[in-house]
């Protein structure tokens, strides 16, 4: 006859001994959910108070958000990021309490990547702002005498600036750093060569006129 007591007793004892860890982990997750929601609300309110949301009204940033099909407010996005940062911290602690070292290690790795990801997003954000700003300056400097040329020059400056910032963001993420360095150098050399050929060959008169008009406006 099977002795069920001796069969299930070790399982029951293991469960009972593991139960405090399970309760502690569940409590940590619940506390993490509560605190992460508080953190999100606090960050959103702070962003509104500091008028951080006003940055999204910048034309260059609006164009970037529209192209990326992002309709969520910028303060909500920042709040959501902080919410998950806090929640992930509590989940990692709960995983360690449960003895799930592998899960904790994976989540810790994800958490360690987030600062670099945020830095890359900030770099892209600054790139969008600067690209739009420089494009306006170039268009304004060239004036309305040749609108097509001013638009073309503005786009060239804008795309060049964004390319540099995109490469910087990729480098921040550690994506093929050596390849990015080679690409960056090659991009600059190509740009300089194209500019030199343009000035030296057929576009010499055009570039001369552009620089003369710009110099006259600056000298006034």
Image (cartoon, helix red, strand yellow):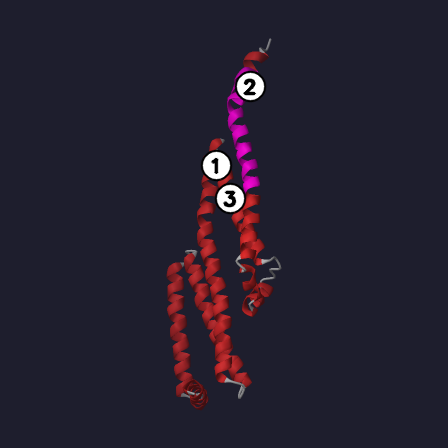
Q: Is residue 162 above or below residue 115?
A: below
The residues tagged by marks 2 and 3 sit, at their Cα atoms, a distance apart of 34 Å
Image spot of residue 148 (x, y percent): 55, 84
Q: Element at badge 3?
A: helix
Residue at 37% across, 61% down: 178
- Quadrant that contains the C terminus: bottom left
Element at label 1:
helix
Disc 1 residue crowd, few under 14, some 14–19, many 20+, Cα 10 Å: some
At horizontal 49% and vertical 71% (from top left) the residue drawn is 131
Q: In terms of depth relative to the viewer, which is nearer, 137 or 26?
A: 137
Is 184 left, or right, of 10 in this rendering? left
Question: Height in image: 75 above or below 101?
Answer: below
Q: Can I make out residue 153 in this image? A: no
Residue 200 pos. (x, y %): 39, 87
Q: Residue at x 54, y 69 (%)?
A: 60
The residue that disc 3 covers is: 86
Reading the chain from its start, which is encountered first: label 3 or label 1?
Answer: 3
* Residues in magenta, as a range: 8-35
Q: Quadrant of residue 51?
A: bottom right
Q: Is residue 219 visible?
A: yes
Dot 2 corresponds to which residue? 12
Q: Residue furthest front?
A: 49
């Amino acid at each position: 006859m099977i002795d069920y007591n001796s069969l299930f007793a070790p399982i029951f004892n293991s469960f009972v001994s593991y139960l405090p860890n399970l309760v502690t982990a569940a409590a940590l997750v619940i506390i993490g959910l509560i605190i992460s929601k508080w953190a999100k609300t606090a960050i959103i309110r702070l962003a509104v108070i500091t008028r951080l949301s006003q940055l999204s009204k910048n034309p260059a940033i609006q164009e970037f958000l529209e192209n990326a099909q992002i309709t969520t407010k910028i303060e909500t996005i920042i709040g959501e990021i902080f919410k998950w940062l806090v929640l992930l911290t509590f989940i990692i602690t709960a995983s360690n309490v449960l003895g799930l070292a592998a899960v904790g290690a994976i989540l810790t790795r994800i958490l360690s990547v987030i600062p670099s990801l945020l830095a890359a997003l900030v770099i892209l954000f600054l790139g969008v702002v600067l690209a739009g700003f420089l494009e306006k300056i170039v268009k304004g400097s060239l004036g309305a005498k040749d609108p097509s040329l001013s638009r073309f020059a503005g786009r060239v400056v804008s795309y060049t600036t964004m390319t540099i910032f995109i490469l910087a963001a990729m480098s921040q993420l550690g994506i093929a750093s050596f390849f990015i360095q080679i690409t960056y150098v090659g991009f600059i050399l190509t740009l300089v060569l194209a500019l030199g050929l343009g000035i030296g060959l057929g576009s010499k008169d055009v570039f001369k006129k552009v620089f003369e008009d710009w110099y006259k406006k600056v000298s006034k």
